[in-house]
Amino acid sequence: MNKTCLECQDKIVGREDKKFCSDGCRNAYNNKMNKDQTNLMRNINNKLRKNYRILTELNPEEKTKTTKNKLISKGFDFELITSIYTTKTGNVYYFVYDQGYLAVENESYVLVKK
């Protein structure tokens, strides 16, 4: 039975269930398959990472207070979060992974870590 590499179409030698002739072809094929067609996912993930870095930098302890202006000046994007948690008392925390924030009075925010 002659099998060919899914990437370069060369003949495959070796195990019966092999799909690629080399690690290079396997990597090239998988990179093509996982490439973001519109870069949308890549851009969103980069912005989420930036938001996470900002929250981590401003919240070195478990709980800190900051202002909206400070978050905005560092480039924080309030549109991108990973989850929302509503407490029994009705407080709404917005999270980027394990770093979260709660809006309080006078455009201030309480930063927390799960």
Image (cartoon, helix red, strand yellow):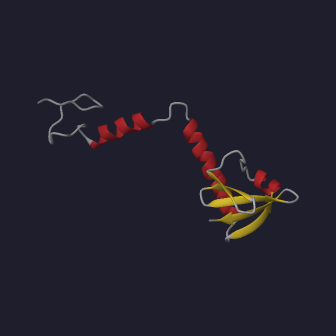
Q: Position of residue 66 (x, y in %)?
A: 79, 62
Most foreground residue, 74 or 1: 1
Q: Is residue 66 above or below residue 14?
A: below
Task: Give the quarter of the image for residue 54.
Answer: bottom right
- Horizontal and vertical percent for residue 13? 15, 37
Q: How many marks are shown on the rendered structure?
A: 0
Q: Nearer the viewer, residue 87 or 75?
A: 87
Instruction: Give residue 60's position: percent from left, percent from top.
Output: 67, 69
Residue at the front extreme, as displayed: 88
Give the image location of residue 56, x and y in percent.
65, 62
Q: Image quadrant for the N terminus?
A: top left
Relative to 82, does residue 2 appear above or below in the rendering?
above
The residue nearer to you, when weighing 68 against 94, is 94
Relative vertical location of residue 37 with respect to residue 24 in this rendering, above or below: above
Q: Outermost residue, right direction?
A: 106
Q: Is 27 placed left or right of 15 in the picture?
A: right
